[in-house]
Image (cartoon, grey):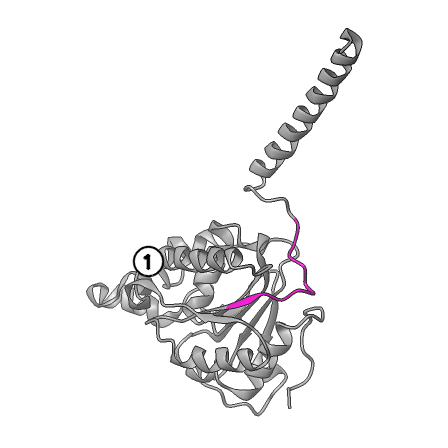
Amino acid sequence: MSPRRRFLLLGVAAVVVVALVVVLGARLLNGGGDGVRPDQARPGTVLLVPGYGGSRTALTRLADRLAAEGRTTDVLTLPGDGTGDLLAQADTLDAAVRDALRDGSPSVDVIGYSAGGVVTRLWVDRHDGAEVARRIVTLGSPLHGATIAGQGAALAPDACPQACRELAPGSDLLDSIDGPLPDGLPWLSIWTENDETVQPPDSARLDGAVNLSLQSICPSARVAHGDLPTDPAVTALVLNALGTDPLTRPTSCPG
C-alpha cells in the first residue's frame, strides 16, 4: 500500500473514531439512551404493577382482558409484600422490563395501580424508563402522597412500613419525582372522585400526563379505589390508551 493511500485510510479511521466518541459521549450525558421513542405502532408486553400490599388479584382480571385482545401480559410480584422500599419495587419492575425486551418485545407498556403508579414513576426516573416504555397508564396513584399514609407515618410510625412512610405527602422520595415527565412519553393518569383510600384523589395528577378524573366523562360513575382495575369503563379506557392511535384525553364515557 502506498504511503498516500495509507495516510488517507488512517485519516478516515480517525474521523470514524472521533464520531463514535461524540455519539457515545452524548449518550452518556443523556443517561445512556439515544432519545429515540419506541414505535407507537408496535405494542409490546404489558407489565402490570400492583398497589400497596402487592395483591395481584384485581390486576389479574385486567391482564386477562388485555390477553383476550392479543396482548402479552405479566402481573408483577413485588418484593416485601408490596409494603417495602418503593425503590426496590422499581428495581423489580426494571428487571421485568429487561426480561421482556430480551424475550423479543419491541418495548413495554406499563400499568401501575395505586402505589404501583408511584413505582412506575420511580422506574421512569431512575431507570431511564422513557427509552423503552411505549405507553404508561396509572390508576388511582398517589403520586403526590396520600393523607392516610401521612397520618400513619406521624401517629403510628411503628405500624407504618417503609412504603407507607414513603407515600406520605412531602416525603423525600415523592419530592424526588415531583417534576414533569420526559418529553414524548404518553402517560394516562386516571382517578376516581369516589376514592376513599387516596385522599385527595387528584394526587394522581401528573405534570406532562393526560390527566383524567373518571367522573369528568362518566358523571354517574360510583367507582371506589379498589374498583379501578376491574370497572368496565376504566378497562375500556385502558384498552384504548394502550392501542396504536395517538393518546389523547377521552371526551365521552366508554360504552
Residue 202: percent from left, percent from top: 51, 72
Q: Please name whichever residue, 35 or 67, is drawn nearer the observer in this view of the structure.
A: 67
| Relative side of 135 to 149, left or right | right
Residue 200 in sight in this render: yes
Classify residue 197 by image quadrant: bottom left
Residue 62: percent from left, percent from top: 49, 80
| Quarter of the figure that contains the N terminus | top right
| Relative side of 237 to 54, left or right | right
Q: What stretch is highlighted in magenta?
A: 36-46
Q: Please name whichever residue, 200 or 120, is drawn nearer the observer in this view of the structure.
A: 120
Farthest residue toward the front? 1
Residue position for label 1: 85
Residue 140: percent from left, percent from top: 48, 74
Residue 180 in sight in this render: no
Image: 97 above or below 233: above
Image: 224 above or below 107: below
- The amino acid at mark 1 is Asp
Question: What residue is rendered at 36% in x and 63% in y?
Answer: 168
| Relative side of 43 to 154, left or right | right
